[in-house]
């Protein structure tokens, strides 16, 4: 297997913390390269991200990558956070712009992720391995696909070492994105982000928000299973495992799983890939 990584979000209640611990315990059996923890927009879960990476690192012994988003953050705040992550011995950061909650005006010092990447390099030198976000199906706010590719390249030119993509279900979207950015001279690894399917209604809502396209054939086959949750999970694992296999056969350098703090759906995919 190529390197894999798992993404978690910061739990806010005791019950959610227990769920994260359970997921981490099961998923670490798959020897991830690292695990990443998301960062809430506008600083809302700022402290929870630090707390969560500390938990995954300290209790579970995992190599961690806190996400850092720049909307709403000042240079001083972001610099302090970088210093605390460095002092804790972390070596990876996922650097993002983030999204402000609607109605909240930005008070941050940076507008785009490329500016954050440049700042991390200025502030922390080469200490951190920096991943940035990539959008094979084009960022939902970008009205010009070529400009979106150039904006992606700007993050790499600013010092990013690699990228993780938004999830997608059409492997050709990934392969043409990689071809396009290679033509622009981007040579860093671009790891596909993989979304397991366990609850189709929830996935549809998410996908509408983040601009990920669910192919019609997947929707139709999922709808055919109606409320049969076990059948939906099985079909989801088959479809996503097949996607992963095609991506790896086509040269993807690794896989990054959006676990949603649950192990079951991700493990079902990994079991199929190993089998
Ligand atoms: P950018 O790269 O800055 O791009 C944002 C938009 O601005 C794009 O449309 C781009 O084309 C455009 N743009 C960039 N530069 C310029 C410029 N100079 N002039 C004009 N337009 C420009 N969100 C969170 O809040 N927390 C998280 O933890 C988180 N983790 C994520 C992890 C991954 C792997 C991915 C793929 C996304 C994640 N997101 C997260 C979502 C992400 O923050 C949003 O999609 C956000 O809208 C864009 O972030 P970005 O870093 O890609 O921004």
Image: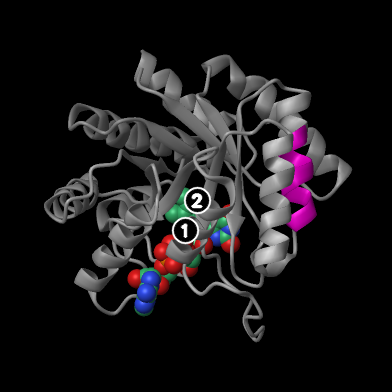
Determine the CA span between mark 2 and mark 1.
5 Å
Note whether residue 199 is visible. no
Q: Position of residue 144 (x, y in %)?
A: 24, 77
Magenta stretch containing residue 151, yes or no? no
Kindly indicate whether the residue at mark 1 contacts the one at mark 2 (C-beta within 8 angstroms). yes
* Residue closest to the eye, 197 or 176: 176
Magenta stretch containing residue 52, yes or no? yes
Bounds of the magenta segment: 46-54
Q: From the viewer's perspective, is residue 150 above or below residue 267?
A: below
Note whether residue 180 is visible. yes
* Furthest residue in direction right, as rendered: 14
Disc 2 secondary structure class: helix
Please name the residue shown 54% across and 29% down the image: 34
Q: Quadrant of residue 242?
A: top left
Ligand 1 resides in the quarter of the picture at bottom left
Residue at numbered disc 1:
118
Q: From the viewer's perspective, is residue 238 above or below residue 139?
A: above
In the picture, measured across the screen, residue 136 lies left or right of residue 258, that is left
**In the rendered view of the protein, which quadrant contains the C terminus?**
top left
Q: Which mark is residue 170?
A: none
Please name the residue shown 33% across and 48% down the image: 221
* Residue closest to the eye, 259 or 95: 95
* Residue closest to the eye, 181 or 222: 181
Tell me if mark 1 has few (under 14), some (14-19) or many (20+) residues whose alpha carbon lies within 10 angstroms of its own: some
Residue at numbered disc 2:
121
**In the rendered view of the protein, which quadrant contains the N terminus?**
top left
* Residue closest to the eye, 154 or 121: 121
Please name the residue shown 47% across and 63% down the image: 113
* Furthest residue in direction left, as rendered: 183
* Some atom of ligand 1 lies within 8 Å of the CB belonging to the residue at label 2: no
Disc 1 secondary structure class: helix
Please name the residue shown 54% across and 34% down the image: 6
């Amino acid at each position: 297997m190529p390197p894999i990584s798992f993404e978690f979000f910061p739990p806010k209640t005791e019950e959610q913390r227990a769920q994260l611990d359970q997921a981490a315990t099961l998923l670490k059996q798959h020897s991830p390269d690292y695990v990443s923890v998301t960062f809430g927009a506008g600083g809302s879960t700022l402290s929870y991200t630090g707390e969560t990476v500390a938990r995954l690192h300290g209790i579970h012994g995992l190599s961690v990558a806190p996400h850092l988003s720049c909307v709403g953050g000042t240079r001083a705040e972001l610099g302090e956070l970088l210093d605390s992550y460095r002092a804790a011995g972390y070596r990876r950061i996922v650097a993002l712009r983030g999204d402000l909650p609607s109605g909240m005006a930005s008070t941050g010092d940076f507008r785009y992720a490329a500016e954050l990447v440049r700042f991390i390099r200025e502030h922390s030198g080469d200490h951190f391995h920096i991943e940035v976000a990539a959008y094979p199906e084009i960022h939902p706010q970008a009205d010009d696909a070529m400009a979106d590719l150039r904006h992606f390249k700007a993050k790499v030119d600013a010092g990013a070492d690699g990228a993780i993509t938004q999830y997608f279900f059409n492997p050709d979207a990934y392969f043409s994105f990689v071809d396009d950015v290679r033509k622009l001279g981007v040579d860093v690894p671009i790891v596909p982000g993989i979304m397991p399917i366990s609850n189709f209604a929830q996935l549809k809502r998410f996908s509408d928000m983040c601009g990920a396209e669910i192919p019609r054939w997947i929707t139709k086959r999922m709808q055919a299973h109606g409320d049969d949750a076990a059948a939906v999970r099985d079909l989801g694992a088959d479809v996503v495992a097949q996607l992963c296999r095609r991506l790896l056969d086509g040269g993807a350098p690794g896989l990054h799983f959006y676990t949603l703090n649950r192990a079951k759906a991700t493990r079902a995919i990994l079991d199929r890939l190993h089998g």
